[in-house]
Each structure stands twice: as structure tokens, then as C-alpha cells.
Amino acid sequence: MEPTGFQISVLDHPSTSEEWRKSLNAPETELPPLSREREEFVSKFGFDPITYRRGLLRGTLRHERVLPQAQLLGRAAQEVLRKMMSDVHLRAVVERLSPGEHDPELNWVFRLQRSGALGWFREEILPPEIAEAILGDGDRSNWEPQLKAWLASVVRDGHQ
């Protein structure tokens, strides 16, 4: 994976039904091995090692799907920030579960930092409609103005 200039943190759940299906149907030879620490954990708590390894595979499949999304969101933010201002930097893109009205919601959080005398560090949830636009058709004209306006409001509010 190429360097991004920002950290990425993604969850290993929830997975899609396809990721579950693949992990449940994978031959044992394709399951990830257990480290010594995980072997001890599985043994200590009486888990079935094969089932545990299937769970590890499911998490790996999810990471392979979600990591490129985080990279794309982060690169979009970096590009817009570079055009807008040189003293605000994206430090991390974090996938987070937040309480929803009925169920937890997955959100993308940007960790932003402003350097200088008026410096600050903020975590802000990227509005889902902007994330969907960036991850959707990829047409920059559909998402760049929204992302720019949102980042400008975050930066403006950062002075308070």
C-alpha cells in the first residue's frame, strides 16, 4: 500500500453477507494462521480454532474492501485542503460506529490539525452525503464543492 500522509483506522465489522459467505465456505488451507498469542486466547476461552480463523478471514476481507474507500476519502480531503489553505492538514481518516436513531451508524471521521499560533486539532464526522458522493461515481464536480464548503465551515468553527 502506498503512503498516504495520513493514518487510516477501519473497523473489522460489520461485514457484508458476501464476506461472511466467503469466510464460511473457504477451505481450511485458505484461512489465516493463528499467532501464538491468538492460539493461547482461543485455547483459554474454549473457542473453536477453525471458527475463529474464519472470523479473521472475514475481517481481512472487510479491510480489503473498506481500506481503499478510506484512502479515497482522505486523498480527496488532502487535495481540497491543499487548494484552500496550507496550514490545515488531514492527520487521519477513521471509520467509527456512532449511535443512530435505531441502530448504530457507520461514519467516516476526519482528524484535522491546524498549525501556527491559532492551531487546533479537531475530529469531525464527514457528512454521509459527501462521503457517498466521493465514493460513488467519482465525478469531482459532484462532490468537490460540497467537500470544500464543509471543510471551510470546519476550519472557520475551529477558531472558536
Image (tube, helix red, strand yellow):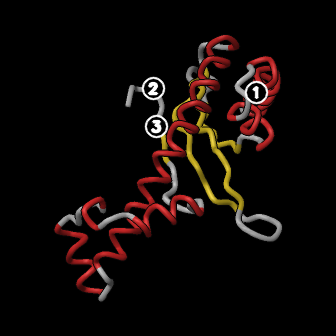
Assess whether mark 1 and mark 3 are in contact (beta carbons under 8 angstroms). Answer: no
Screen quadrant of the N terminus: top left
Quarter of the figure that contains the C terminus: top right
Q: Which residue is mark 1?
A: 147
Disc 2 element: loop
Q: Distance of mark 1 from mark 2, alpha carbons?
A: 19 Å
Which one is nearer the viewer's eye here, 86 or 120?
86
Looking at the rendered structure, the secondary structure element under dot 1 is helix
Which residue is label 3 attached to? 7
- For disc 2, the neighbor class at 10 Å (few under 14, some 14 to 19, many from 20) is few
Name the amino acid type tagged 2. Answer: Gly
Q: Is residue 72 above or below residue 26?
A: above
Quadrant housing residue 134: top right
> Which disc is residue 5 wearing?
2
Alpha-carbon neighbours of circle 1 within 10 Å: few (<14), some, or many (≥20)?
many
User: Which of the two residues, 148 or 143, is positioned nearer the viewer here?
Assistant: 143
Sequence-earlier tag: 1 or 2: 2
- Quote the CA–CA distance across marks 3 and 1: 19 Å
Q: CA distance from mark 3 to mark 2?
A: 7 Å
